[in-house]
């Protein structure tokens, strides 16, 4: 029987109090769980989630304060934005985005929330099963998540979204939230392609055509990404084979 490994992060101001109540009153909880205390759900950044998955987690659960009641005003909003970004990357990797869940609806029903997530992951199966990879093999994929979401522009966009869509930007304008989300998603998709190219060319150069075939993308898309990588000094032209240029990532 598959017993999923869940890594649960709980906010110190709300959900953790429910966890403490379970321990104090000795309520029955059928699963052995170690809740990880964090000062705010907004402190759970992509690197922390990636480390949890690399450590063998089949699912990551983040429990924060209900919307509108964050002690740090925008903490759970930041958690929501990072969760959305990370779910998109999981989907791009071929993994189920449901393997990451952010709960901001109830900060007291911690047992119900955990049980529901546990059953969902149990039905999904071990991480990697959806793409035919073992748990050990799928760990390498999460390097793509790091390469994508550690991009400085993406980190800035996610970190500043609340201000840009609710207050104003440097020009005194408020951005439309849906338009902002679409822009961010396109940027993440572009950065994910760059991450894939970086990963594939880390040990040796490859041509645009070779990369396009490997990634099942058009040569035009790959070449555009390579041009952007060269602009940022993340890739360089190494040599020519039969007059075909080959590129390698620079890290």
Image: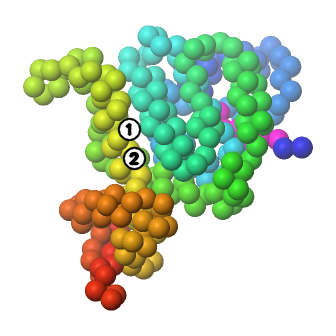
- Which residue is the site of mark 2? 189
Determine whether 33 is above or below 178 in the image.
below
The answer to whether 160 appears left or right of 40 in the picture is left
The answer to whether 233 appears left or right of 59 in the picture is left
The answer to whether 46 appears left or right of 121 in the picture is left
Image marks 2 and 1: residues in contact by CB distance under 8 Å: yes
Q: Which mark is residue 119?
A: none
**Where residue 125 sits in the image (x, y, percent)?**
76, 43
- Which residue is the site of mark 1? 185
Cα distance in 3D space between marks 2 and 1: 6 Å
Asked where in the image residue 203 lies, by quadrant, the reply is bottom left
Determine whether 150 is above or below 182 in the image.
below
Asked where in the image residue 37 lies, by quadrant, the reply is top right
**Where residue 36 sits in the image (x, y, percent)?**
63, 34
Residue drawn at x 76%, y 25% is 115
Q: Secondary structure at mark 2?
A: helix
């Amino acid at each position: 029987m598959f017993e999923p490994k869940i890594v649960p992060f709980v906010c110190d101001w709300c959900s953790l109090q429910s966890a403490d109540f379970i321990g104090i009153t000795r309520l029955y909880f059928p699963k052995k769980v170690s809740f990880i205390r964090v000062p705010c759900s907004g402190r759970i950044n992509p690197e922390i989630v990636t480390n949890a998955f690399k450590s063998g987690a089949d699912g990551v659960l983040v429990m924060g304060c209900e919307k509108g009641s964050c002690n740090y005003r925008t903490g759970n909003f930041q958690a929501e934005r990072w969760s959305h970004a990370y779910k998109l990357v999981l989907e791009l990797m071929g993994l189920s985005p449901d393997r990451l869940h952010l709960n901001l609806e109830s900060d007291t029903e911690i047992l119900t929330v955990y049980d529901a997530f546990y059953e969902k992951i149990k039905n999904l199966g071990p991480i990697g099963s959806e793409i035919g990879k073992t748990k050990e093999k799928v760990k390498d994929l999460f390097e793509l998540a790091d390469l994508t979401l550690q991009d400085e522009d993406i980190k800035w966009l996610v970190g500043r979204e609340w201000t840009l869509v609710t207050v104003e930007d440097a020009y005194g304008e408020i951005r439309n939230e849906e338009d902002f989300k679409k822009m961010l998603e396109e940027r993440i998709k572009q950065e994910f392609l760059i991450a894939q190219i970086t990963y594939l060319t880390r040990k040796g150069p490859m041509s645009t055509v070779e990369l396009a075939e490997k990634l099942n993308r058009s040569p035009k898309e790959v070449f555009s990404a390579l041009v952007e990588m060269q602009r940022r000094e993340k890739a360089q032209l190494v040599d020519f084979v039969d007059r075909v240029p080959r590129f390698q990532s620079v890290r």
